[in-house]
Image: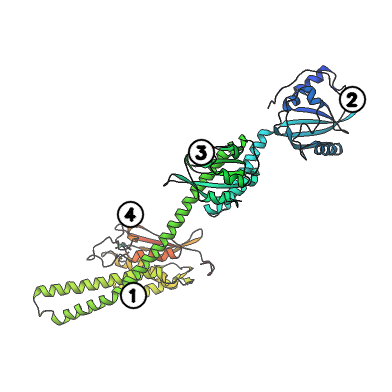
Amino acid sequence: MPRGATGNTRAAPIGSEMLTSEKYRSIFDYACDAILIYDMNTGAILDANDKASKLYGYTLSETRTADFGKLSAGWYPYNSEGAMERIRQARNDGQQLFEWLARDSFGRLFWIEVNFNRAEIDGKDVILAFVRDIAERKKTEQRLALQYTVTRALSEAASLTEATPLVLQSICEHVGWDHGEVWFVDTEKSVLRRSGEWNCSSEFCTISRNMTFARGVGLPGRIWAEERPIWITDVANEPDFIRITAASEAGIHAAFGFPIRSEGSIIGCMIFFSRTVQAPKHDLLDMFQSIGSQIGDFIKRKQAEEELRNYAAELERSNKELQQFAYIASHDLQEPLRTVSGFVELLRKKYQGQLDEKADKYISFAVEGAHRMSTLISDLLAYSRVGTQAVGFGPVDMNAVIKQAIDNLKVAIQESQAVITSDDLPEVTGDRTRLVQLLQNLIGNAVKFRKTDAQLQIRISAGAAENEWTFGIHDNGIGIKAEYFDRIFVIFQRLHPREAYAGTGVGLAICKKVIELHKGRIWVESKPGEGSSFYFSLPFPRPIAEA
Ligand code: ADP
């Protein structure tokens, strides 16, 4: 990067007779790097090439007579004393490679990489310094370091509220400023509202907490309106700085802020304050453009996560409430229903045939209705019990579960003359009672939805996949159309009229709930007229405490 005047006078080297030959002088001047030659003992510059004079913005003769301190930032280790230490090390080790904060003739600071080599030229012990401007590299490094710091702060925070002060702190520490604040757009009121701060204890912060800024007003409002980072060298000289009294009491001078951008629009801004006057650093402002978007994306993601978490919690709460309601309602309905069915049954027994034909019909409708309602209520109760009652997980032998389920269905199975075969089944971790209920429903359905013109065959299978068991209940019954594969697991969903097949449509919904409790999956494969296979998976046994 060329810096200022070159002063390329081709004057004879000062202080030595080195490189007298024109040929070598040209090579020296045309080298890609700035080259300086130092006296190894005193640190005085003996010679410098054209590139060096361009880099530092001095004429060639000024460069050759400069000392290390003049070409450096001016404070330790970037001064003559620090440079002498490097020269001494190069004298001992033969070489030194290091980064250095240099200063040019205009007072601008910039980073260089210096390669010191001990050499002997014309019998004189010297240090040859190859110097390269690494401002761009440093800028990239600084941007990456800041991005890394901000990303770390963002990723370590569990929530947005936790993330904000961490981000403010990491930026403040990185740029060496005193405190920071964050403002978010309140879309309803069209103002910016303060939503977080770091390292802020003065009155300036107390008043800021309760302030709002409209678009274009004050520093936050200007960043919002102009959609760009803004730097104020000293707020004392800024007529638009609204919080000036509190700021000067708090000793605040410089300020800079950048917009937080998400999906193309400004959602807020971050502002930082320093107790010293600070000249604008354009690299820093450029860098914060991209960091502002990074923070905006994070905020949007966190907000979405938080919304999702709240939604899930709300859903869980309302599900629990609904389950509780279903349980209480079905439980409490049983009692008056028992009275109704008891009395209509009595009515039927006592008065059937004694009244007219119509009355007999009405009574039988009432008995049938009460009976159906009682089945519905007890099925609903069974369904809500799956979710409301405690789960007793333990090792369960699935062979015993099948045996129990078949035993419970003894009468229906005998009636259907079903032939049931089963693989040797594994042991799982689960709630035995609920697993019996699951198998009883599935085998019960296989029996119920059998074909009238074929011998019913039911086969129970088990297979191991990556980390779970898959069980199958296969029948050669009436089958199910593929379009109903999902619907049948929804409560009260049936595919047939009551007259064709009795039932309430609760059985498979119970199966689904039982399987979900066990962190497994349930599904069906079937072809109408050929039979159905109901599958469910259960994770491999885990330690009981974990389950
Ligand atoms: P229900 O048996 O009380 O009707 P389920 O929830 O157990 O309720 O089943 C829902 C529907 O799924 C049944 O009405 C039936 O149409 C269908 N179904 C379930 N199991 C089978 C099966 N093994 N074969 C054919 N259809 C079945």
Dot 2 amino acid type? Asp
Q: Is residue 267 above or below residue 135?
A: below
As helix, strand or loop, the secondary structure at mark 2 comes to loop
The quadrant of the rendering that contains the N terminus is top right
Mark 1 Cα-neighbour bin, 10 Å: few <14, some 14–19, many ≥20: few
Q: Which residue is mark 4?
A: 482
Q: Earlier in the sequence, mark 4 or mark 3?
A: 3
What whole-number distance in Å separates the C-alpha atoms at marks 1 and 2? 112 Å
Name the residue furthest bottom: 350
**What residue is pinned by disc 1?**
410
Badge 4: how crowded within 10 Å, few (<14), some, or many (20+)? few
Q: Give the residue pinned by disc 3.
A: 222
Query: Where's ligand 1: which quadrant?
Result: bottom left
- Residue at 64% x, 37% y: name it: 140
Residue 122: mark in rendering: 2
Kindly report the distance in space between the C-alpha atoms of the residues bearing marks 2 and 4: 95 Å
